[in-house]
Image (spheres, rainbow, N blue to C red):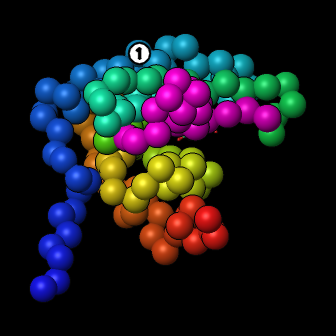
Amino acid sequence: MDQVKLSGGAMPLSQETIEKLIQQSQEAKLQAYCTYSNFRVGAALLTKDDSVITGCNVENACYNLGICAERNAMAKAVSEGHRSFKAIAIASDMKNEFITPCGGCRQFMREFGLDWDVYMSKPDGSYLKKTVEELLPFSFGPEALPK
Ligand code: THU
């Protein structure tokens, strides 16, 4: 029998959890070090064991060394022992558009699975939810490499 594939991530989050995660991403945004672009981004990553690890973008005078908020949060999480994620919320100051992760961050998310949720928000708390797989179809990942 064909397996039924649930869309929208493995386990649905409660509305309260989603709202809190977005709020935490907005708080992380306040720490953004973005002297060059002046474009603040915050991320809040929810781990399988319900820890929340936040990140902001951190730019550099050597422009190409800047790191995005999402990647910062994921690197922090891994360095603290977390490798399984339920969701990530992203916040920026754009009032009229949802903040969407760059291609590099999508690939970085994909490293940790395809079936988890990305909440792309606006400052008013509204959001768009997509799975990592929806954001990066036909992707290349760790399974392709020999063990
Ligand atoms: N940025 C992020 O941190 N996350 C995104 O989703 C998009 C872009 C950062 C990178 C850079 O510091 C600034 O926003 C402008 O591109």
Residue stretch rendered in magenta on the structure: 65-85
| 33 displayed left or right of 24 | right
Residue 93 visible (yes or no): no
Query: Residue 100 location, x and y as percent?
Result: 46, 47
> Mark 1 — residue?
27
Image-quarter location of ligand 1: top right
Residue at x-position 24% and y-position 23%: 20
Counting from the top left corner in percent of width and height, residue 82 is at 46, 32
Q: Furthest residue to the right?
A: 62
Tell me where residue 92 appears, x and y as whole percent. Answer: 46, 30
Please state which of residues 83 and 56 is positioned toward the viewer in this rendering. Answer: 83
Q: Residue furthest bottom?
A: 1
SS label for mark 1: helix
Q: Quadrant of the C terminus?
A: bottom right
Q: Is residue 78 magenta?
A: yes
Q: Which residue is drawn at the image coordinates 47% and 50% (left, top)?
A: 112
- The foreground one among 98 and 56 is 56
Q: Is residue 26 magenta?
A: no
Q: Position of residue 86 (x, y in %)?
A: 31, 41
- For the question of whether residue 137 can be seen, the reply is yes
Rendered residue at 22%/32% (across/down): 18
When the figure is inspected, residue 9 is found, relative to residue 134, above or below; the finding is above
Up/down of 84 relative to 33, above or below? below
Q: Amino acid at mark 1?
A: Glu
Q: In the picture, which quadrant includes the N terminus?
A: bottom left
Local crowd size for mark 1, using a 10 Å CA cut-off: few (<14), some (14–19), many (≥20):
some
